[in-house]
Amino acid sequence: MSQVVNYVVDGTIGVISVDNPPVNALSQPVRQGLLDAISAAQTDTSEAVVIICEGRTFIAGADITEFGKPAVEPMLDVLLNTIEASTKPVVAAIHGTALGGGLETALAAHYRCAVASAKVGLPEVKLGLLPGAGGTQRTPRLIGVQAALDLITSGEPISAPQALELGLIDKIVDGDLTESAIAWARHLLKEGAGPRKSSEQPVPAFDTGIFDKYRAVLAKRARGQVAPQNIVTCVEAATKRSFEEGLKVERALFSECMQSPQSAAMRHLFFAERQAAKIDDLPKHTPLRTIDSVGIIGGGTMGGGIAMCFANAGIPVTLIEVNDDALERGLSIVEKNYAASVKRGKLTDDRATKCRTLITGSTDYASLADADLVIEAVFEDPELKKTIFARLDATCKPGAILATNTSYQDVNQIAAATKRPEDVIGLHFFSPANIMKLLEVVRAEKTADDVLATCMALARRIRKVPVMSRVCYGFIGNRMLQPYFREAQLCLIEGATPEQVDNAMEAWGMAMGPIRVADLAGIDVGYKARQALSEAERGDPRAYRVADVLAEMGRLGQKSGAGFYRYDPETRKHSSDPVVLEIIEREAAAFGIERRAIPEDEIVDRLVYALVNEGMRILEEGIAQRPGDIDIVYVYGYGFPASRGGPMHYADAVGVKRVYERVLEFSERFGAEAWAPAPLLVQLATE
Ligand code: T1G
């Protein structure tokens, strides 16, 4: 047999085992090996076949690294139809994660068993794809239309017990999986069980209106995305056509997805996320420090959310506040957040209680003396942060990591407030910290390699996606956000309304338009930050004048019930407010600006290319290691559409030359100070 697939006949049972680390992806050699093995089984002495995998998981899908390259036989659907057509019963034995083509392989088998800890799922939609090897046709036949639509359009894996309840698997086995699977196969033979084709199962009864319902829901939830809509069409075909005809629909729509720029963008992000976890200049086996206890300074919204991240990962946390009242408030925020997670079904009551008890409060720094990591999460006052770090320096044990959650301050200066700058690092969480996946890990000049490596690994332990940034004002995300917001404000004063700017960006794919984001974050946050800057550092006054007027009027955004929009106190729904338009027109007149209608594509290009141009500077300066890191920051931290792959991938998709020409045009129209093309953009476009 091949290097990656082994086949032995154990008495009456043929055992096919796949061994293609790290995740047994269905590469060409694996497909060939499986085909050879299942073909051999048809004519040898075996009476039944077990398919199992070595290593940490069952097949985790097609080999994504083969996508976009010429397809090589055998094709997956041909292989799976061969497995299903086996004259001898085939049992799939699942451990780890049976995902995508891996689950489709198991569905082509006649029987499925799994260890209780296994997970199964069809995550293709997260790659802008759909299950392309029979998954959209076999799944509804096994678990019904609604469950199939939920599983495939969410892309979320389910546990083995849930899969058993749905009928996606037949049995949960204990003990050694290989032995249990072989024993079960023998039992099936003894029971006279033969091949049982999922493709021949009738689709259980369903509500005929379900497809239109899902199309409408997905049009909102996955605005502009092709794959989710195609999935609904495939599952609908499973209810209206023969299995073979349904497979044809699936194949055609799969290929449409595979060719789409959306899938190219989402596949880019799959690898960019894994790449982002790697630090190029860090020795491979840099030792990690032990993190078994954490302290957090500041029990505000961020502090409370950060505490939950560690408690949810089973790490005890001590929350420090200045006095008992503040501590009480901090702990009650945590309490409320857990109650909300239980209410939303994200956590069971039991689990929430277990996590909650891992968070204790104190007003005494001495309680942090033995903490392995301390994270400062107080408001953005540089002097206060330095005072806190000096105190931590005097309190914490040698080897403790001292981190700041600042969103833009100079971590080198904060580190300089201690005698151990090598133990200082930035850990920039995003609000709400217990929900947002992104973690900017800020490497200061003196941050030790093991401190950096420890924090990159720790991020995955608390289920965050880490991206390393060097020190600059605002690091990667917030630094790029400045020119993005600048253009949003300039579009307002030059002629657009808040709705026009937000609708243009949301129609393009942003989760939320920039004006609504400003209201959500709080107009006072930007206002206070500007007060700390000199006139020159504040930049073009036309880009913040309106925001300053609103802040001085006490219109701080959602938190005060009004900002650029008005907010319904009950529903928090936003609505336009003519008062704001009057302010914009008045300030425009004061600047002598003749307002004009701004086309949607100009709004989009100005905001997105402002991100790209600043991203280029960040790469030139080495603040970010690679373009993919910037893409991960924007997709996981700033609501940039995954189906566009992040700002840097988008620039490549549009064509860097086109971006350059548009930036040059903006530089002529709106001034070189704001729009001077980054040298890297010039180089890439001209070369
Ligand atoms: N193909 C190729 N490489 C893969 C891979 C795959 N399917 N899955 C993982 N890798 C690599 C990954 O890049 C990394 O490499 C290493 O394995 C470890 O991964 C026809 C079309 C399985 C849950 O979408 O979700 O089937 O960085 O760091 O955190 O219908 O990997 O070390 O060089 O993520 O333990 C559908 C994708 C494909 C599942 C493990 N399947 N994988 O997570 O490890 S489309 C998926 C995952 C498909 C069919 C369709 C996760 C994991 P490197 P890792 P992990």
Image (cartoon, rainbow, N blue to C red):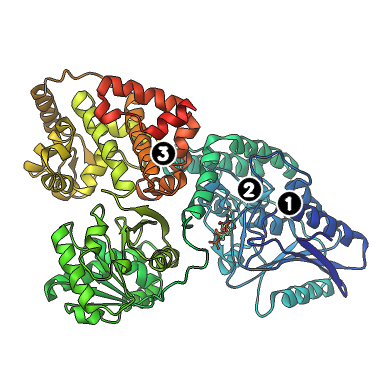
Q: Which residue is mark 2?
A: 65
Task: Report, in whole angstroms, how far the alpha carbon at label 1 lies from the one at label 2.
Answer: 29 Å
Locate residue 186: give its quadrant.
bottom right
Query: Is label 3's Cβ within 8 Å of ligand 1?
Result: no
Residue 302 visible: yes
Upstream in the sequence, badge 3 or badge 1? 1
Q: Position of residue 638 (x, y in %)?
A: 35, 46
Which mark identifies residue 539? none
Q: Are marks 1 and 2 in contact (CB under 8 Å)?
A: no
Query: Is label 2's Cβ within 8 Å of ligand 1?
Result: yes
User: Crowding at label 1, few (<14), some or many (≥20) Cα neighbours within 10 Å?
Assistant: many
Residue 338 visible: no
Task: Report, in whole angstroms, how far the alpha carbon at label 3 lies from the one at label 1.
Answer: 42 Å
> Which quadrant contains ligand 1?
bottom right
Query: Could you tell me which quadrant the N terminus lies in?
Result: bottom right
* In the depicted structure, whether residue 672 falls above or below residue 389: above
Element type at mark 3: helix
- Residue type, label 1: Ser
Viewer-nearest residue: 608 or 186: 608
Upstream in the sequence, badge 3 or badge 2? 2
Between disc 3 and disc 1, the foreground one is 3
Q: Which residue is mark 1?
A: 199
Q: Position of residue 237 (x, y in %)?
A: 64, 40
- Residue type, label 2: Thr
Q: Which residue is mark 3?
A: 647
Q: Position of residue 611 (x, y in %)?
A: 35, 37
Residue under the point 59% across and 39% down: 233
Task: Report, in whole angstroms, how far the alpha carbon at label 3 lies from the one at label 2.
Answer: 22 Å
* In the depicted structure, whether residue 149 falls above or below residue 655: below
